[in-house]
Amino acid sequence: MRQKLVMGNWKLNGTKESVNTLVNALLAPVNAATNVEVAVCAPAIFIGTVEALAKGSALQYGSEDCDVHTSGAFTGENSPVMIKEFGCKYAIVGHSERREYHNETNEVVAAKYEAAQAAGLIPVLCIGESLAQFEAGETADVVKTQLKAVIDKCGIKSFEKAVIAYEPIWAIGTGKTATPEIAQNVHAQIRAFLASFDADVAAKVQVLYGGSCNAKTAPELFKQPDIDGGLVGGASLKPADFAAIIEAAK
Ligand SMILES: O=C[C@H](O)COP(=O)(O)O
Protein backbone atom coordinates (compact mmCIF):
# COMPACT_ATOMS: atom_id res chain seq x y z
CA MET A 1 0.00 0.00 0.00
CA ARG A 2 1.57 3.26 -1.11
CA GLN A 3 1.26 6.27 1.16
CA LYS A 4 -0.06 9.50 -0.32
CA LEU A 5 2.47 12.33 -0.66
CA VAL A 6 1.51 15.97 -1.10
CA MET A 7 4.44 18.15 -2.09
CA GLY A 8 4.51 21.89 -2.61
CA ASN A 9 6.88 23.44 -5.12
CA TRP A 10 7.18 27.12 -4.33
CA LYS A 11 9.21 27.86 -7.48
CA LEU A 12 10.65 31.41 -7.50
CA ASN A 13 8.29 32.78 -4.86
CA GLY A 14 8.43 33.92 -1.26
CA THR A 15 9.85 36.47 1.12
CA LYS A 16 11.29 35.98 4.60
CA GLU A 17 7.93 37.05 5.96
CA SER A 18 5.73 34.96 3.67
CA VAL A 19 7.81 31.82 4.24
CA ASN A 20 7.41 32.32 7.97
CA THR A 21 3.66 32.79 7.70
CA LEU A 22 3.15 29.91 5.29
CA VAL A 23 5.16 27.29 7.17
CA ASN A 24 3.67 28.26 10.53
CA ALA A 25 0.17 27.99 9.06
CA LEU A 26 0.94 24.52 7.68
CA LEU A 27 2.31 22.91 10.83
CA ALA A 28 -1.06 22.08 12.42
CA PRO A 29 -2.69 20.56 9.30
CA VAL A 30 0.50 18.66 8.48
CA ASN A 31 0.86 17.26 12.01
CA ALA A 32 -2.81 16.23 11.96
CA ALA A 33 -2.49 14.38 8.64
CA THR A 34 -0.89 11.29 10.10
CA ASN A 35 -1.59 9.09 7.06
CA VAL A 36 -0.26 11.58 4.49
CA GLU A 37 3.34 12.60 3.83
CA VAL A 38 3.67 16.33 3.27
CA ALA A 39 6.67 18.26 2.00
CA VAL A 40 7.51 21.68 0.64
CA CYS A 41 10.28 22.34 -1.84
CA ALA A 42 11.67 25.82 -1.37
CA PRO A 43 14.07 28.14 -3.18
CA ALA A 44 17.55 27.29 -1.88
CA ILE A 45 17.89 30.61 -0.09
CA PHE A 46 14.90 29.77 2.15
CA ILE A 47 15.78 26.15 2.97
CA GLY A 48 17.56 27.07 6.20
CA THR A 49 14.50 29.05 7.30
CA VAL A 50 12.21 26.11 6.52
CA GLU A 51 14.57 23.81 8.44
CA ALA A 52 14.26 25.99 11.54
CA LEU A 53 10.49 26.45 11.26
CA ALA A 54 9.71 22.78 10.55
CA LYS A 55 11.87 21.44 13.37
CA GLY A 56 9.98 18.93 15.50
CA SER A 57 7.03 18.77 13.09
CA ALA A 58 5.97 16.20 10.51
CA LEU A 59 6.62 18.65 7.67
CA GLN A 60 9.34 17.39 5.33
CA TYR A 61 11.10 19.66 2.89
CA GLY A 62 13.35 19.65 -0.11
CA SER A 63 15.06 21.65 -2.82
CA GLU A 64 13.66 22.57 -6.23
CA ASP A 65 16.77 21.37 -8.04
CA CYS A 66 20.34 20.31 -7.29
CA ASP A 67 23.62 20.34 -9.13
CA VAL A 68 25.37 17.24 -10.41
CA HIS A 69 28.55 18.19 -8.52
CA THR A 70 29.15 17.96 -4.80
CA SER A 71 31.58 20.92 -4.69
CA GLY A 72 33.94 22.93 -6.84
CA ALA A 73 34.04 25.90 -9.18
CA PHE A 74 30.38 25.94 -10.20
CA THR A 75 29.22 29.44 -9.36
CA GLY A 76 25.59 29.76 -8.40
CA GLU A 77 24.88 26.05 -8.06
CA ASN A 78 23.61 24.15 -5.01
CA SER A 79 25.29 20.88 -4.16
CA PRO A 80 23.11 17.93 -3.15
CA VAL A 81 25.47 17.40 -0.21
CA MET A 82 24.82 20.96 1.02
CA ILE A 83 21.08 20.47 0.51
CA LYS A 84 21.21 17.28 2.57
CA GLU A 85 23.14 19.06 5.33
CA PHE A 86 20.15 21.40 5.79
CA GLY A 87 17.90 18.43 6.55
CA CYS A 88 16.21 18.13 3.17
CA LYS A 89 14.58 14.81 2.37
CA TYR A 90 13.83 15.51 -1.30
CA ALA A 91 15.32 17.22 -4.36
CA ILE A 92 13.16 17.88 -7.39
CA VAL A 93 15.03 17.06 -10.60
CA GLY A 94 13.97 17.55 -14.19
CA HIS A 95 11.12 19.98 -13.62
CA SER A 96 9.86 21.09 -17.02
CA GLU A 97 10.83 24.68 -16.21
CA ARG A 98 14.45 23.54 -15.68
CA ARG A 99 14.30 21.45 -18.86
CA GLU A 100 12.94 24.41 -20.84
CA TYR A 101 14.71 27.47 -19.38
CA HIS A 102 18.01 25.80 -18.47
CA ASN A 103 18.24 23.38 -21.37
CA GLU A 104 18.38 20.34 -19.10
CA THR A 105 18.41 17.21 -21.22
CA ASN A 106 17.28 13.75 -20.12
CA GLU A 107 20.96 12.91 -19.57
CA VAL A 108 21.55 15.96 -17.32
CA VAL A 109 18.40 15.13 -15.37
CA ALA A 110 19.59 11.55 -14.91
CA ALA A 111 22.94 12.84 -13.62
CA LYS A 112 21.15 15.11 -11.12
CA TYR A 113 18.95 12.21 -10.03
CA GLU A 114 22.08 10.11 -9.46
CA ALA A 115 23.84 12.92 -7.56
CA ALA A 116 20.80 13.50 -5.34
CA GLN A 117 20.62 9.83 -4.40
CA ALA A 118 24.37 9.67 -3.78
CA ALA A 119 23.94 12.49 -1.25
CA GLY A 120 21.11 10.64 0.50
CA LEU A 121 18.29 12.71 -0.97
CA ILE A 122 15.15 11.29 -2.58
CA PRO A 123 14.96 12.66 -6.12
CA VAL A 124 11.52 13.71 -7.31
CA LEU A 125 11.83 13.00 -11.01
CA CYS A 126 9.53 15.23 -13.07
CA ILE A 127 8.38 13.95 -16.44
CA GLY A 128 5.67 15.07 -18.81
CA GLU A 129 4.78 16.12 -22.32
CA SER A 130 4.18 19.46 -24.03
CA LEU A 131 0.82 20.46 -25.48
CA ALA A 132 2.02 19.68 -29.03
CA GLN A 133 3.18 16.22 -27.91
CA PHE A 134 -0.11 15.63 -26.09
CA GLU A 135 -2.12 16.62 -29.17
CA ALA A 136 0.05 14.40 -31.35
CA GLY A 137 -0.64 11.43 -29.07
CA GLU A 138 3.03 11.18 -28.04
CA THR A 139 2.59 11.30 -24.26
CA ALA A 140 3.48 7.67 -23.57
CA ASP A 141 6.59 7.80 -25.75
CA VAL A 142 7.78 11.03 -24.12
CA VAL A 143 7.44 9.84 -20.54
CA LYS A 144 8.97 6.45 -21.32
CA THR A 145 12.01 8.12 -22.94
CA GLN A 146 12.38 10.39 -19.90
CA LEU A 147 12.20 7.39 -17.55
CA LYS A 148 14.52 5.25 -19.68
CA ALA A 149 17.32 7.82 -19.45
CA VAL A 150 17.27 7.40 -15.65
CA ILE A 151 16.90 3.62 -15.79
CA ASP A 152 19.89 3.42 -18.17
CA LYS A 153 22.09 5.51 -15.87
CA CYS A 154 20.94 4.47 -12.39
CA GLY A 155 19.08 1.19 -12.82
CA ILE A 156 15.48 0.25 -12.11
CA LYS A 157 16.22 -0.48 -8.44
CA SER A 158 17.08 3.22 -7.96
CA PHE A 159 13.32 3.86 -8.05
CA GLU A 160 13.10 2.19 -4.63
CA LYS A 161 14.43 5.52 -3.32
CA ALA A 162 12.78 7.99 -5.68
CA VAL A 163 9.47 9.67 -6.39
CA ILE A 164 8.07 10.32 -9.87
CA ALA A 165 5.96 13.37 -10.68
CA TYR A 166 3.95 13.27 -13.89
CA GLU A 167 3.36 16.87 -14.94
CA PRO A 168 1.75 17.52 -18.33
CA ILE A 169 3.37 20.82 -19.28
CA TRP A 170 0.11 22.10 -20.76
CA ALA A 171 -1.47 21.86 -17.29
CA ILE A 172 1.25 23.68 -15.34
CA GLY A 173 0.11 27.08 -14.11
CA THR A 174 -2.62 27.19 -16.75
CA GLY A 175 -5.63 26.24 -14.67
CA LYS A 176 -6.20 23.38 -17.15
CA THR A 177 -5.87 20.34 -14.89
CA ALA A 178 -5.65 17.01 -16.68
CA THR A 179 -8.88 15.12 -16.12
CA PRO A 180 -8.62 12.30 -13.58
CA GLU A 181 -9.08 9.85 -16.47
CA ILE A 182 -6.26 11.31 -18.55
CA ALA A 183 -3.93 11.51 -15.55
CA GLN A 184 -4.77 8.00 -14.35
CA ASN A 185 -4.19 6.61 -17.83
CA VAL A 186 -0.69 8.12 -18.01
CA HIS A 187 0.14 7.08 -14.43
CA ALA A 188 -0.89 3.52 -15.26
CA GLN A 189 1.34 3.58 -18.35
CA ILE A 190 4.26 4.87 -16.27
CA ARG A 191 3.77 2.06 -13.77
CA ALA A 192 3.40 -0.55 -16.52
CA PHE A 193 6.62 0.66 -18.15
CA LEU A 194 8.51 0.40 -14.85
CA ALA A 195 6.91 -3.02 -14.26
CA SER A 196 8.39 -4.24 -17.54
CA PHE A 197 11.77 -3.87 -15.75
CA ASP A 198 10.75 -4.75 -12.18
CA ALA A 199 7.16 -5.36 -11.06
CA ASP A 200 7.94 -4.96 -7.37
CA VAL A 201 9.63 -1.57 -7.82
CA ALA A 202 6.76 -0.40 -10.04
CA ALA A 203 4.15 -1.39 -7.46
CA LYS A 204 5.88 0.53 -4.67
CA VAL A 205 7.05 3.79 -6.25
CA GLN A 206 4.97 6.90 -5.52
CA VAL A 207 3.81 8.64 -8.70
CA LEU A 208 2.50 12.16 -8.10
CA TYR A 209 0.38 14.26 -10.42
CA GLY A 210 1.28 17.92 -11.03
CA GLY A 211 -0.34 20.62 -13.13
CA SER A 212 -3.01 22.94 -11.73
CA CYS A 213 -3.66 20.52 -8.89
CA ASN A 214 -5.75 22.51 -6.45
CA ALA A 215 -8.35 22.19 -3.70
CA LYS A 216 -11.08 21.61 -6.30
CA THR A 217 -9.32 19.08 -8.54
CA ALA A 218 -7.28 17.14 -5.95
CA PRO A 219 -10.11 15.01 -4.49
CA GLU A 220 -10.97 13.22 -7.77
CA LEU A 221 -7.34 13.01 -8.87
CA PHE A 222 -6.30 11.42 -5.58
CA LYS A 223 -9.04 8.77 -5.86
CA GLN A 224 -7.36 7.30 -8.94
CA PRO A 225 -5.57 4.01 -8.23
CA ASP A 226 -2.20 5.02 -9.68
CA ILE A 227 -2.11 8.63 -8.43
CA ASP A 228 -0.26 8.77 -5.13
CA GLY A 229 -0.58 12.47 -4.40
CA GLY A 230 0.37 15.75 -5.98
CA LEU A 231 3.23 18.08 -6.81
CA VAL A 232 1.56 21.41 -6.26
CA GLY A 233 2.78 24.77 -7.54
CA GLY A 234 0.55 27.83 -7.22
CA ALA A 235 -1.86 26.37 -4.67
CA SER A 236 1.01 25.43 -2.35
CA LEU A 237 1.61 29.13 -1.68
CA LYS A 238 -1.85 29.55 -0.13
CA PRO A 239 -2.07 27.86 3.28
CA ALA A 240 -5.83 27.19 3.14
CA ASP A 241 -5.65 25.73 -0.37
CA PHE A 242 -2.64 23.57 0.43
CA ALA A 243 -4.31 22.35 3.65
CA ALA A 244 -7.40 21.40 1.61
CA ILE A 245 -5.21 19.42 -0.80
CA ILE A 246 -3.64 17.61 2.16
CA GLU A 247 -7.15 16.87 3.42
CA ALA A 248 -8.06 15.39 0.03
CA ALA A 249 -5.15 12.97 0.34
CA LYS A 250 -6.28 11.56 3.71
O1 LIG B 1 5.82 21.66 -9.62
C1 LIG B 1 4.64 22.00 -9.73
C2 LIG B 1 4.01 22.08 -11.01
O2 LIG B 1 4.81 22.69 -11.96
C3 LIG B 1 2.59 22.51 -11.01
O3 LIG B 1 2.44 23.89 -10.89
P1 LIG B 1 0.96 24.47 -10.75
O4 LIG B 1 0.31 23.72 -9.63
O5 LIG B 1 1.14 25.92 -10.44
O6 LIG B 1 0.28 24.23 -12.05
Image (spheres, helix red, strand yellow):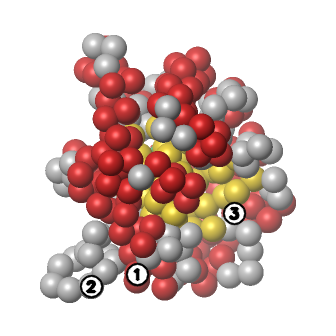
Residue 38 on image: x %, y %: 67, 58
Of 83 and 219, nearer the camera is 83
The amino acid type of the residue labelled 3 equals Leu
- Mark 2 lies on residue: 71
Decide: marks 2, 1 in contact (CB < 8 A)?
yes
- Mark 1 lies on residue: 81
Q: Residues within 10 Å of mark 2 (few under 14, many from 20)?
A: few
Residue 21 on image: x %, y %: 61, 70
Decide: marks 3, 1 in contact (CB < 8 A)?
no
Instruction: Quarter of the image for the C terminus: give it.
Output: top right
Q: Earlier in the sequence, mark 3 or mark 2?
A: 3
Disc number placed over residue 26 in the picture, else none: 3
Residue 232 is at least partly visible in this image: no
Residue 248 is at least partly visible in this image: yes
The amino acid type of the residue labelled 2 equals Ser
Question: In this picture, is 87 found above or below 144?
Answer: below
